[in-house]
Image (cartoon, rainbow, N blue to C red):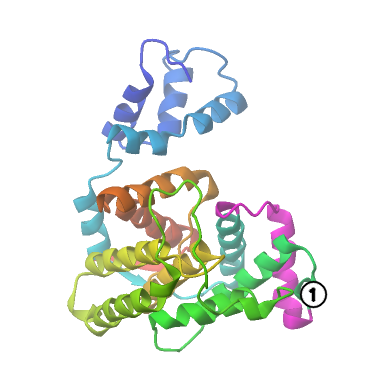
């Protein structure tokens, strides 16, 4: 996207300075000041903005959309009380959740079809025709829906080894469900990753070590600030992706476990919008390479706040 007079990266700075979105800043420059070069038809301009990937550019240029400390203060000064007070709002959120989660993992299935699947599952449960589907994408959606229902209703005490249960639930409708609910028994390569996954011989040991961190966190969660708790959960999420304990489904299971941990502190579930996929994966990669989690923290802080708005749940600032 070319800007007349105003360079692309300066639009990022301008939008941050005035605390407005990159998109609204571009529109104002285009329609009020006539500083956008090229076709500024609203649909075409929106496409050009999307192709520019402003969130990814911010990370590449080291531009912060918000001061991380400010985000921590917002979270720490907020009282979250996540309750499914509106079934309609929750069901819509769940459809958005599963659509974006599966798109994030490359499952190409449309929003309307996912909406139909989730609605049928809600009405018919295991009698739904989708539970007997032979199509891989549908099986993935149905299994993932089961995982989301579990983590949002279970009274089980959280434990790292319960990722095995989550994995088993995700694969229960596959032709070979016995392949799920167990750690991988061979080494694999994560495409485009900058790290080597844990050798399969060491997975149980690494998961056990991570379990000590999970147990310590939850035993002491009431004595630490909410932001500190959230950031510990994000580090655990990242560690699961590095261990990569399963042959398939690691991304969805690691984020499901993160959401389970958030629920324990009354925080609503979050999902990464598929158009922000590159921002999320770039943040994970930065943590892989440099152990710098700040970008990843920001990604999830914004998602928490966005979920609160989307779910219209009750919260207030102290």
Residue 181: x and y in percent read: 56, 79
Q: Which residues are magenta?
A: 103-127
Q: Quadrant of residue 133?
A: bottom right
Instruction: Look at 58% across and 25% down and name the residue there.
Output: 42
Compared to 53, does 173 lie above or below?
Answer: below
Verify whether residue 111 appears in magenta: yes
Compared across the picture, whether 138 is left or right of 225 comes to right
Q: Quadrant of residue 124?
A: bottom right
Residue ID for mark 1: 132
Magenta stretch prevailing secondary structure:
helix
Instruction: Look at 41% across and 60% down and name the residue there.
Output: 197
Q: Quadrant of the C terminus?
A: bottom left
Verify whether residue 24 appears in magenta: no
Say few, some or many: other residues with alpha carbon within 10 Å of mark 1 (under 14 / 14 to 19 / 20 or more): some
Q: Is residue 21 among what the camera can see?
A: no
Compared to 1, does 253 lie above or below?
Answer: below
**Dot 1: element:** helix
Compared to 243, does 69 lie above or below?
Answer: above
Residue 203: x and y in percent read: 41, 73
Residue 28: x and y in percent read: 43, 24
Q: Is residue 96 among what the camera can see?
A: yes
Instruction: Look at 54% across and 26% down and name the residue there.
Output: 48
Disc tally is 1
In depth, the one of 194 and 17 nearer the eye is 194
Instruction: Look at 57% across and 55% down and name the residue there.
Output: 105
In depth, the one of 4 and 312 nearer the eye is 4
In depth, the one of 81 and 239 nearer the eye is 239
Compared to 71, does 76 lie above or below?
Answer: below
């Amino acid at each position: 996207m070319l800007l007349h007079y105003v360079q692309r990266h300066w639009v990022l700075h301008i939008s941050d300075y005035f605390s407005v979105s990159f998109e609204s800043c571009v529109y104002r420059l285009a329609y009020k000041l006539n500083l956008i070069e090229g076709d500024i038809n609203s649909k075409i301009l929106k496409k050009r903005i999307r192709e520019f990937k402003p969130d990814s550019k911010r990370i590449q240029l080291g531009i912060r959309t918000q001061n991380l400390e400010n985000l921590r203060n917002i979270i720490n000064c907020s009282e979250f009380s996540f309750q499914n007070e509106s079934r309609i709002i929750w069901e819509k959120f769940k459809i958005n959740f599963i659509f974006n989660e599966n798109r994030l993992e490359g499952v190409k299935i449309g929003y309307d079809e996912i909406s139909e699947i989730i609605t049928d599952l809600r009405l018919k449960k295991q009698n739904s025709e989708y539970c007997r589907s032979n199509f891989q994408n549908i099986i993935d959606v149905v299994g993932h829906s089961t995982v989301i229902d579990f983590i949002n209703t279970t009274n089980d005490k959280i434990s790292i080894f319960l990722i095995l249960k989550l994995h088993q639930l995700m694969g229960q409708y596959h032709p070979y469900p016995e392949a799920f609910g167990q750690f991988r028994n061979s080494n694999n390569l994560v495409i485009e990753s900058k790290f080597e996954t844990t050798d399969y011989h060491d997975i149980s040991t690494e998961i056990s070590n991570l379990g000590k961190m999970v147990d310590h966190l939850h035993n002491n969660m009431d004595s630490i600030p909410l932001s500190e708790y959230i950031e510990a959960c994000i580090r655990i999420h990242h560690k699961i992706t590095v261990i990569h304990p399963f042959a398939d489904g690691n991304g969805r299971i690691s984020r499901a476990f993160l959401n389970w941990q958030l629920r324990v502190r009354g925080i609503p579930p979050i999902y990464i919008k598929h158009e922000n996929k590159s921002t999320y994966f770039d943040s994970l990669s930065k943590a892989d390479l440099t152990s710098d989690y700040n970008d990843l923290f920001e990604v999830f802080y914004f998602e928490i706040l966005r979920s609160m708005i989307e779910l219209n749940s009750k919260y207030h600032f102290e």
